[in-house]
Amino acid sequence: MNFVGYRSTIQAAWCLLIISAAMFDARPCAAQRRQRKPETSVVALPADKRFPNLGELKTKLTEYHNCQPRAAPGCYEQDLSATISRARKYLQSRPSRGRKLAMVLDIDETSLTNWEEIKEDDFGYHSKIFNDWLAEAKAPAIKPTLELYNLARQRGVAVFFITGRRDSQDLREATMRNLKAAGFADWEGLILRPQGDKPCETYANRKETSETVCYKASARKKITADGYRIIINVGDQMSDLRGGYAERAYKLPNPFYYIP
């Protein structure tokens, strides 16, 4: 190509570039750049972060109970087993000499699981609905606790159940039927809370305000007065365990409800 032809080619390219630039509308690109900018900042008071979102919390509790997803930290079944394993080790290492030995177990979420009703009621509590569920006597055993129970019986340790369920003939019969159906048999005693009682009025520590603590500690005191030495006390609430009258107390996980 000679110089004149090369120059003509360059001029043609420049003309094409100028025409293309004239035809190009830059406004869509500018609009896209504006769309890529961050969205409007959200202003929230610090108080908005003070409490967890209830819907998200229920989802997390369900995942924790069901051990899903597996990669998530924490698993209800594993945490139950880990706590009961410590109680088993103490039971196996505890010499059997001395006074009659006893173990105390709470029932709900300690010996029997009410997860079916908890989930059905969306983590709420309605006394009539819950009592109707208890009357059906179909709550499954919490397996690690049942294994601990059987080990205690094999070692000659008497087992007492102390529950916050209110004492009535129907509920007592349903509770006994449920325990036996779930595999618990040959216990030494089943203690239900009397109707309309005011346990803190007669409790030794007048500063204690938790009726559950006053009732359960008084029940354990009576067991010891009958000649037993309680070596293990297992419950899912701190109110199941406070107040003494047991060598060791083991708290099972229960993030599903709280009893003061």
Image: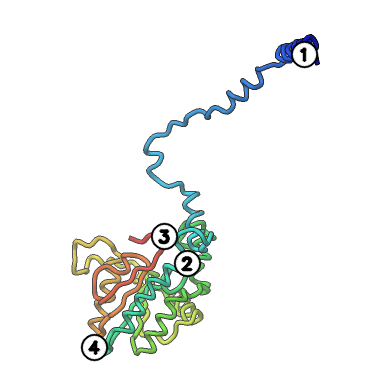
- Residue found at the very far front of the displayed protein: 2
Q: Label 3: which residue?
A: 255
Q: Are marks 4 and 2 in contact (CB under 8 Å)?
A: no
> What amino acid is labelled 4 in the image?
Arg
Read off the residue under disc 1.
6
Q: Earlier in the sequence, mark 1 or mark 2?
A: 1
Sequence-first disc among 2 and 3: 2
Q: Quadrant of the C terminus?
A: bottom left
Q: Which residue corresponds to the image point at 54% horizontal and 27% vertical from the top-left?
A: 37
Dividing the picture into quadrants, the one containing residue 98 is bottom left
Comparing 145 with 11, the one in front is 11
Residue 150, picture quadrant: bottom left
Foreground pick, 170 / 160? 160
* Mark 2: amino acid: Asn
- Residue 99 is labelled as 4
Question: Disc 3 marks which amino acid?
Answer: Pro
What residue is disc 2 on?
131
Earlier-in-chain disc, 4 versus 2: 4
Q: Nearer the viewer, mark 1 or mark 3?
A: 1
